[in-house]
Image (cartoon, rainbow, N blue to C red):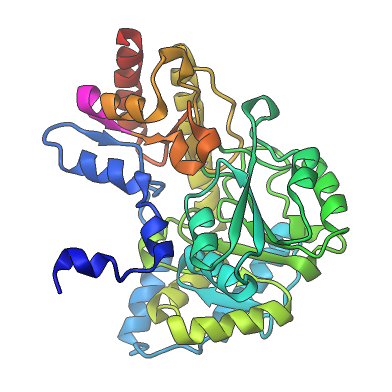
């Protein structure tokens, strides 16, 4: 059988899923010679805090190189439960309601595979993380996009949510603080959404990976903290962003035992268990690294203000991001599409950013700039962006 013929043996679903545009621009930039700058990948430039690395090293020295329990080490699950209660007033039984996963992405995939039958609808506010829509499609579900608009600060409005719900809605995915817009839902924003959701049978998947990177005084508020919501909400979180642990590949999901248990069954067969060394390190991160997380968040805030000021000075309107580490400026004044803007910026100024349409069709006319990089690289890149816009 020829290689070309083999492609016809792939499922129609897999063939319909596009490759990540984020990786496309990152790869193009990495192949460039000279002083190319990538602001495309959402990866902290900080090294994992020393105490966390030391805990991982010590676990290896002690010979802890075997499988963990499928659900994750009890020590880590207990630390996760304590952390979520301490930081966000969420209560979970570490024995029955916490599952350690290989990154937050596995948790999202598990939720889709456990809940969705063919034809079930999933409401997804967009722009959003690129994995949401495709995890739904790979599980046989039907994504229902709800555009979040710049005039609303890219926040999900109650009337938009209500209009998207149907009798076939099985799940609602909420990714706030948001990737790519940096939008945050306050307690006042969440309250009317909760009122609507409590009248449905929909399960909420709340992706809170950027919970520690919220730049409002009141901090992050989880939808699972509202009365009536813990019994229908799956909270996804992890260590990649706040603790600078991307390469450790560790996340977790928390929710009702009746959902977490079946998701652990899928996890058993697909993954078996999360990395042992990473789990020992993550437990240390939750116990001792609040100061390091706070220091990194303060530095991100400085970078956030630098990028926001630069894009506005370049003549690009931009909603102020209140969380995560992305800025999502409006490039429509240039007359270029999102893809054209990013391709030309990379070719002419050697700066890689991501077209907004990678995060949903309503992202067309915008671009995502990640500021999880050193301030010197950011300032250099923003100077090049200003020069590029001025010459368009």
Give 256 or 73, whichever is nearer the viewer: 256
Q: Quadrant of the C terminus?
A: top left
User: Which of the 4 quarters of the picture holds residue 96?
Assistant: bottom right
Image height check: is 83 above or below 297? below
Depth check: give the residue in front, 162 or 275.
Answer: 162
Quarter of the view holding residue 321: top right
Where does the N terminus fall, quadrant-wise? bottom left
Can you give x and y, in whole percent of width and height, for residue 32 in the image?
15, 37
Q: What is the quadrant of residue 189 in the picture?
A: top right
Q: Residue furthest top?
A: 390
Does 68 sit left or right of 287 as displayed?
left
- Residue 176 appears in the figure: no
Q: Residue at x 51, y 49 (%)?
A: 129
Residue in front for this viewpoint, 201 or 308: 201
Q: Position of residue 132 (x, y in %)?
A: 53, 55
> So how many labels did they put on this image?
0
Q: Position of residue 20 (x, y in %)?
A: 37, 50
Is 352 on the left or on the right of 193, as rendered? left
The relative height of residue 281 versus residue 4 in the rendered view (above or below) is: below
Magenta-span inclusion, residue 389: no
The segment highlighted magenta reads 346-352
């Amino acid at each position: 059988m020829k290689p070309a013929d083999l492609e016809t043996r792939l499922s129609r679903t897999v063939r319909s899923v596009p490759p990540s545009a984020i990786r496309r621009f990152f790869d193009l930039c990495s192949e460039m010679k000279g002083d190319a700058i990538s602001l495309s990948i959402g990866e902290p430039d900080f090294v994992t805090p020393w105490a966390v690395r030391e805990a991982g090293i010590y676990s290896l020295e002690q010979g802890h190189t075997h499988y963990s329990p499928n659900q994750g080490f009890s020590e880590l699950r207990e630390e996760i439960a304590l952390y979520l209660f301490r930081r966000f007033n969420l209560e979970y039984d570490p024995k029955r309601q916490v599952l350690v996963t290989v990154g937050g992405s596995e948790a999202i995939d598990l939720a889709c595979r456990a809940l969705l039958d063919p034809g079930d609808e999933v409401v997804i506010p967009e722009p959003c993380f690129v994995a949401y829509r495709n995890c739904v499609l790979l599980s046989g579900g039907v994504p229902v996009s709800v555009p979040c608009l710049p005039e609303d600060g890219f926040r999900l409005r109650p009337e938009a949510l209500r209009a998207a719900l149907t009798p076939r809605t099985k799940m609602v995915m909420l990714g706030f603080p948001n990737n790519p817009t940096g939008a945050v839902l306050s307690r006042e924003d969440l309250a009317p959404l909760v009122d609507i959701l409590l009248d449905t049978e929909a399960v909420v998947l709340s992706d809170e990976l950027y919970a520690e990177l919220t730049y409002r005084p009141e901090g992050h508020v989880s939808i699972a903290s509202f009365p009536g919501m813990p019994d229908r909400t799956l909270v996804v979180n992890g260590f990649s962003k706040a603790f600078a642990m991307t390469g450790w590949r560790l996340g977790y999901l928390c929710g009702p035992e009746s959902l977490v248990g079946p998701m652990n069954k899928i996890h058993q067969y697909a993954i078996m268990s999360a990395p042992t060394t990473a789990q020992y390190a993550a437990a240390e991160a939750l116990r001792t690294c609040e100061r390091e997380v706070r220091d990194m968040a303060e530095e991100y805030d400085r970078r956030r203000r630098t990028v926001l000021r630069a894009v506005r000075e370049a003549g690009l309107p931009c909603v102020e991001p209140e969380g995560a580490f992305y800025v999502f400026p409006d490039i429509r004044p240039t007359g270029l599409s999102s893809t054209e803007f990013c391709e030309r910026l990379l070719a002419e100024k050697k700066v890689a950013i991501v077209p907004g349409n990678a995060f949903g069709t309503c992202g067309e006319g915008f671009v995502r700039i990640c500021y999880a990089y050193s301030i010197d690289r950011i300032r250099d890149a923003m100077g090049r962006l200003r020069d590029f816009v001025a010459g368009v």
